[in-house]
Amino acid sequence: MASPTPHGVPDGLGAALVPPDLAELLRAQLEAVADEVEEEVRGQVPEYARPADGTHRAHLRAGVVQALTLFVDHIADPRGRWDAIAATYYELGRGEAQEGRSLDALQSALRVGGLHAWRLMGRTAEELGLDSAVVAALGELAFRTVHEVAEAAAAGYAEAQLSSTDELERRRRRLLDLLLGEGPVSVEAVQDLAHGARWSVPRHVAVVALAATPDHREEDRPLAAAGALVDMESRPPRMLVPDPDGSGRFASRAFVLALRGRPAAIGPTVPLAEAARSLGWATRALGLMGRGILPRQGVVRCADHLSTLLLHSDEPMLAQLRSRVLHPLDAASEGQRGRLAETLLAWLLSGSNVPDVAARLHVHPQTVRYRLRQLEKLFGDALHDPDTRLDLILALRSEALQDNDTFTT
């Protein structure tokens, strides 16, 4: 990114007001002034008070010298170019961001250094007996210089932060793609990518599949749980959550609120190497939510709906089971079929207890007995065969869920 250009210098500081030899006199004192300014910054700004390594000391020294040079060059030529100095402070700002220091520390250093430099150079101007208007113009130029280099440093700092954030996001996306890919996961590859992505490798994870939205508004993006890896561009959007069973994470209202009303399905907790399996279950559950087989809204935990997920894990086979096992019901009229299927499922689930079936269906026990006699005619002895009873429960349960899907669509 190119460094910014200055806004200019005070128009009032013209060559006629400044003695020709002032710039050269100040330039001769520049190294000595730079020594004092550097020590002042190190003494006044805690972030710069550490024992300096060679690189850090060189950057600080270069920044001080360049700022003083800019000030003197502006005196010598108020309209002169400052590209090299702006680039120096731009890189200084980038370096501060990359080393994890705050922009406040850098701005404090510039203020402290600029004020101290002005005191030292202002003393020289007074010793020369310069007119007060010239001294005032020099003071304005000094603080304008601080402003200009601060802007360049801030631009570099902001660019480095943006680049760092974007790169970190890219690394985390690559890590997530690796963990959720179809092939085997190499522990070494995960550790290498996790280190570059600043991500602590957990032992267990769960993957959350999120309902997609028509547009990609930033305000709809979920607030990620701590340490979560998020990919909102995939279909469906997904979030890998480390150590999901700790601190009641998914059970908390905070997690639901963080999703901002977006329906979601939470896959089972699995070892990290099996994250793709958690995603597969979560994606399947999200699809069943869309069909109304599982609740359409809110957050659905796969662990709470294992039987439903198992039933729908191979839907063509499930259709074959329903067609074969429930074939006797085809002899009933359309109106009778639904009532008989409902009664048969309730009877099987209640242990063949007629009063319980009547209470469950809100009908008279005699009505239940009448329907059971009809079922006996249709199914015969198969109703009392344990294997057939299990098949009937699975087929009737899936049909009931399918009817709910049809009803809510």
Image (tube, helix red, strand yellow):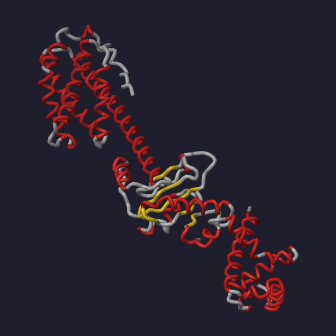
Q: Please indicate whether residue 317 sits to the left or right of residue 238 in the image.
A: right
- Residue at x 28%, y 41% (from the top left corner): 99
**Quarter that holds the N terminus:** top left
| Residue 100 position (above or below residue 90) | below
- Residue at x 61%, y 45% (from the top left corner): 215
| Residue 145 position (above or below residue 319) | above
- Residue at x 32%, y 29% (from the top left corner): 90
Residue 103 visible in the displayed image:
no
Relative depth, front residue between 90 and 212: 212
Relative depth, front residue between 51 and 364: 364
Q: Please indicate whether residue 174 sits to the left or right of residue 8 in the image.
A: right
- Residue at x 70%, y 70% (from the top left corner): 401
Please provide percent x and percent y for residue 407.
76, 66
Please provide percent x and percent y for residue 404.
73, 68
Q: Quadrant of residue 107?
A: top left
Q: Quadrant of residue 133?
A: top left
Please provide percent x and percent y for residue 312.
64, 67
Q: Please indicate whether residue 232 sits to the left or right of residue 325 in the image.
A: left
Relative depth, front residue between 150 and 368: 368
